[in-house]
């Protein structure tokens, strides 16, 4: 047995192994109510195996073509050997076609009239009429991801180079990063919100020193009242989907990955907006900025000070309001343009006022508080507060991807739905621990 033949057998064995692994992975997919649930690890393993299968099949075809070329490219005097090798190559290629369900270019070549006209080498090794593939019959052309090919002939036979898709940039910082991770199995979060620590007469905390006795009577202790109100934070669903043809996702693993990633990224953008700005109506979360009871601070309030306040000063004064509510602030959310103004603030000598470590690439912080600069909050507005204490985010179901063909007439059209979904709740338990900063105008 020659080296080429043994190599082909090795590749065929490897191909069968990869196909068996993918079948095992596919058998492990869960089906719930007609929906196929595929984990990220399963998807990655399946895609890797498919890539290996395509590469191995390509190597087998290449080796088979080399063997056929060797058989008819030998010297004219060895016609018997040439004919024998050609028949062996033809037999091996037919076996591969039967085993793997495809017809290779080499198989079609040795069965073509042009090749057979050589008569096993009796007529030499040069064909008068060159043999050409018919891509429409062999399916050797490249399948485009669209229903119709664009102008030109990108599917014609030859070497095709397809550059990777350049995905759009993504937002890296998230409001969620300020909250400690917490999960729930409930559909509704019930909690008590303390509105104040007041006396029966409406004053502040009424605790005071009390004498043991006053004459013959024991000292009376004053009463303070704590006011609570019951609140609910229902679990809300954030979701969206995209339709795709089954063949497109099978033929273009990169496209499948982009669809999955973009759907997940879309959920993150919506989540940031809901945490901050959700109005609580319908299926919206009650966001922090729309919760009644949070404090406000305007940048222009520093107008009466001897030295004009900067935006950084306004953030510090807002943090003081949170401290005075007996809650230590843990973070700041602001628009990138406002954060840029703070980072670029200089004194009269042109020196930056913010810490040099930030300018050198250090962790973005201001007044010891981490910064989340995101377009999810409106320009000219910032939020300072005790994230995770004054408000808590609950994950009922973390973001996931599901695939199904049970939508409208997708089954008969060979189309599928790729669905991204998550469920979460937000409870703002102590609104006074948050301060909304408005950069209305610079202090005059």
Image (tube, rainbow, N blue to C red):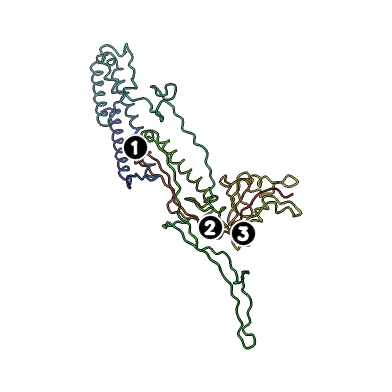
For label 2, the SS is strand
Q: Earlier in the sequence, mark 3 or mark 1?
A: 3
- Front one among 267 and 63: 267
Badge nearest the viewer, 2 or 3: 2
Instruction: Give residue 428's mark.
Output: 2
Quadrant containing the N terminus is top left
| Residue sitting at x 31%, y 33% | 11
Task: Give residue 48's position: percent from left, percent from top.
Answer: 38, 38
Determine whether label 2 and label 3 are within 8 Å by CB.
Answer: no
Side of 312 where 144 appears, left or right: left
Tell me, for residue 409, which label it has, or none: 1
**Percent position of residue 17, x then y:** 30, 38
319 left or right, relative to 421? right
For this orientation, the residue located farthest to the bottom is: 216
| CB contact under 8 Å: marks 3 and 1 | no
Please, what secondary structure does the residue beneath circle 1 have?
loop
- On residue 322, which mark appears? 3
Q: Assess disc 3: are there few (<14), some (14-19) or many (≥20) residues with their C-alpha within 10 Å of its C-alpha.
A: many
Relative image position of residue 192 (x, y in whole percent): 51, 63
């Amino acid at each position: 047995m020659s080296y080429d033949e043994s190599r082909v057998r090795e590749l065929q064995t490897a191909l069968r192994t990869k196909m068996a692994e993918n079948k095992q992975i596919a058998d492990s997919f869960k089906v719930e109510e007609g929906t196929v649930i595929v984990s990220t690890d399963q998807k990655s393993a399946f895609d890797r195996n498919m890539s290996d299968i395509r590469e191995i099949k390509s190597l087998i075809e290449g080796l088979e073509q080399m063997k056929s070329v060797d058989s008819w490219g030998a010297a004219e005097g060895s016609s018997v050997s040439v004919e024998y090798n050609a028949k062996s190559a033809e037999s091996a290629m037919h076996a591969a076609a039967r085993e793997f369900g495809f017809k290779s270019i080499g198989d079609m070549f040795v069965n073509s009239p042009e090749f057979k006209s050589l008569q096993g080498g009796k007529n030499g090794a040069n064909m008068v009429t060159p043999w050409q593939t018919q891509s429409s019959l062999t399916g050797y052309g490249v399948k485009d991801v669209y229903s119709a090919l664009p102008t030109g002939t990108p599917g014609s036979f030859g070497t095709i180079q397809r550059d990777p898709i350049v995905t759009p940039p993504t937002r890296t910082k998230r409001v969620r990063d300020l909250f400690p991770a917490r999960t729930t199995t409930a559909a509704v979060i019930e909690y008590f919100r303390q509105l104040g620590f007041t006396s029966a007469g409406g004053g502040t905390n009424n605790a005071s020193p009390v004498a043991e006795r006053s004459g013959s009577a024991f000292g009376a202790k004053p009463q303070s009242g704590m006011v609570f109100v019951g609140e609910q934070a229902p679990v809300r669903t954030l979701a969206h989907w995209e339709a795709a043809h089954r063949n497109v996702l099978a033929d273009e693993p990169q496209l499948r990955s982009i669809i999955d990633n973009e759907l997940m990224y879309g959920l993150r953008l919506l989540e940031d907006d809901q945490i901050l700005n959700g109005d609580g109506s319908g299926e919206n979360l009650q966001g922090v900025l729309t919760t009644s009871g949070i404090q406000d601070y305007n940048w222009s309030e520093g107008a009466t000070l001897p030295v004009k306040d900067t935006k950084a000063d306004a953030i510090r004064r807002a943090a003081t309001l949170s401290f005075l509510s007996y809650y230590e602030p843990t973070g700041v959310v602001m628009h990138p343009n406002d954060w840029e103004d703070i980072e670029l603030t200089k004194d009269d000598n042109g020196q930056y006022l913010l810490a040099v470590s930030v300018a050198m690439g250090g962790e973005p912080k201001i007044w010891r508080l981490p910064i989340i600069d995101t377009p999810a909050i409106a320009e000219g507005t910032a939020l300072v507060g005790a994230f995770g204490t004054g408000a808590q985010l609950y994950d009922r179901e973390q973001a996931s991807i599901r695939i199904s063909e049970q939508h409208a007439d997708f089954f008969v059209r060979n189309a599928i739905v790729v669905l991204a979904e998550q469920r979460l709740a937000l409870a703002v338990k102590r609104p006074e621990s948050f301060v909304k900063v408005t950069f209305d105008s610079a202090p005059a």
